[in-house]
Amino acid sequence: MKLLVTGGAGFIGTNFIRYWLHHYPDDAIVNLDLLTYAGDLSSLTDIATHYPERYKFAQGDILDSTFVENVLKEERPETIVNFAAESHNSRAILNPRRFFETNVMGTQVLLDAAQKYDVQRFHHISTCEVYGELPLDSPNRFSEDAPYRPQTPYNASKAAADHLVNAYFHSFGTPITISNCANNYGPYQHPEKLIPLFTTNAIRDLPLTLYRSSHNRREWLHVDDHCAAIAAVLKHGKIGETYNVGSGVEKSIEEISDFILDVLNKPQTLKTYVPDRPGHDCRYFLDSEKIARDVGWKPAIAFEEGMRETIQWYVENQEWWQTIQQKADSEMVQEDKWEKFTAR
Ligand SMILES: NC(=O)c1ccc[n+]([C@@H]2O[C@H](COP(=O)([O-])OP(=O)(O)OC[C@H]3O[C@@H](n4cnc5c(N)ncnc54)[C@H](O)[C@@H]3O)[C@@H](O)[C@H]2O)c1
């Protein structure tokens, strides 16, 4: 089978390509990525070297229908896995428009091209954040039937894309599946995201900037478990269905920072409290029974073990994240400046 992976130079896409080529030796992947600040081919150097016949890269924008159609015409993939997105909530507060262009209109371009070139499966990667937030003390979880209540521009753009993907299934019979995943952690994540940001700051004895609502919780899943879930949905999922992908492991931002400081043997005094980002959701928690029951996927990586390995990966791969950080330096979001922003 040949897959077209969009956004394959980003965090999850990189890990997915590595996972798939390793587990499915008869398959080939074309990675279509614009290489925005978030995409970096250095994450795939080993893949390009080890699999020259099974891995190809095509640089371009999912908003460019001519480019996308040309890739599909030439490569004729059976499956598309759409990771390409603007993915950082903080950046969506500063520039919402770009999120709607890429995440919604880009997905629409891909769906049209998938129809035209008879793609057998369009799998769309989405997030738990489309369901909105849960109160900290709620016994509830979000199932696939929960109403969409996005509260940030990033979440709203992902929610809109999910509706669009479902609409193509109902209106045109496009063979889609969607997975809505909890927060991922693992190697090759951009150093602007929470766990790499805290880890790389702690390594350099720089402050860990926690939003004041540091008791807010997230559900954490190792990226390899996410990749296994996508593989399970591609192999055993039902066309037209949405699957939640969660670990059941919740940790507050405070607990995450404490864990990182503890593993790196750094002092608590590195923790610095800053104003919350606008729209900072309290809590997301998924009910992931459906994917376990219907598709047979369950997470395999224990949180403590996965986190220790991840932190160690950032310790051992400082050149990777330092280069990315230098490239993005002038564009890094200043997470301690939200008060000024909301007062505007
Ligand atoms: N990271 C998480 O915890 C998480 C959780 C749930 C869902 N998701 C979803 O998973 C997907 C991947 O997330 P990630 O964390 O790997 O994101 P990322 O920001 O690390 O990577 C995004 C990739 O998309 C590429 N891209 C951006 N705009 C593009 C365009 N117009 N055309 C082509 N390529 C473009 C970037 O260059 C980058 O390589 C996203 O759709 C995101 O919403 C992420």
Image: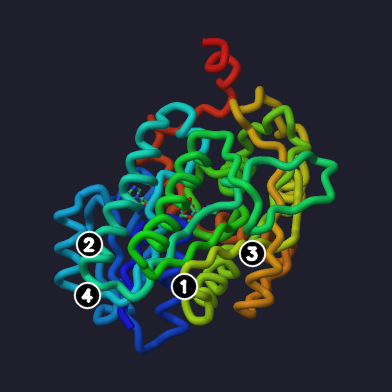
- Circles 4 and 2, Cβ within 8 Å, touching? The answer is no
- Which residue has dot 1 on it? 239
Q: In the visual, does 52 lie left or right of 289? A: left
Secondary structure beneath disc 1? loop
- Measure the alpha-carbon separation of dots 1 and 3: 35 Å
Question: Residue 62 in the image: x percent, y percent?
Answer: 27, 52
- Measure the alpha-carbon separation of dots 3 and 2: 31 Å
Answer with mark 1 or mark 3, whichever residue precedes in sequence. 1
Is label 4 or label 3 in front? 4
Q: In the visual, does 22 lie left or right of 60? A: right
- Measure the alpha-carbon separation of dots 4 and 2: 14 Å
- Measure the alpha-carbon separation of dots 4 and 1: 20 Å
Residue 203 visible in this rendered orientation of the protein: no
Question: Residue 92 in the image: x percent, y percent?
Answer: 46, 33
Disc ID at residue 309: 3
Residue type pointed to by label 4: Arg
Q: Residue at x 52, y 41 (%)?
A: 155
- Which residue has dot 4 on it? 76
* The residue at label 4 has a CB less than 8 Å from ligand 1: no
Secondary structure beneath disc 2? strand
Is label 3 or label 2 in front? 2
Residue, far top:
344
Answer with mark 4 or mark 3, whichever residue precedes in sequence. 4
Answer with mark 4 or mark 2, whichever residue precedes in sequence. 2
Answer with mark 3 or mark 2, whichever residue precedes in sequence. 2
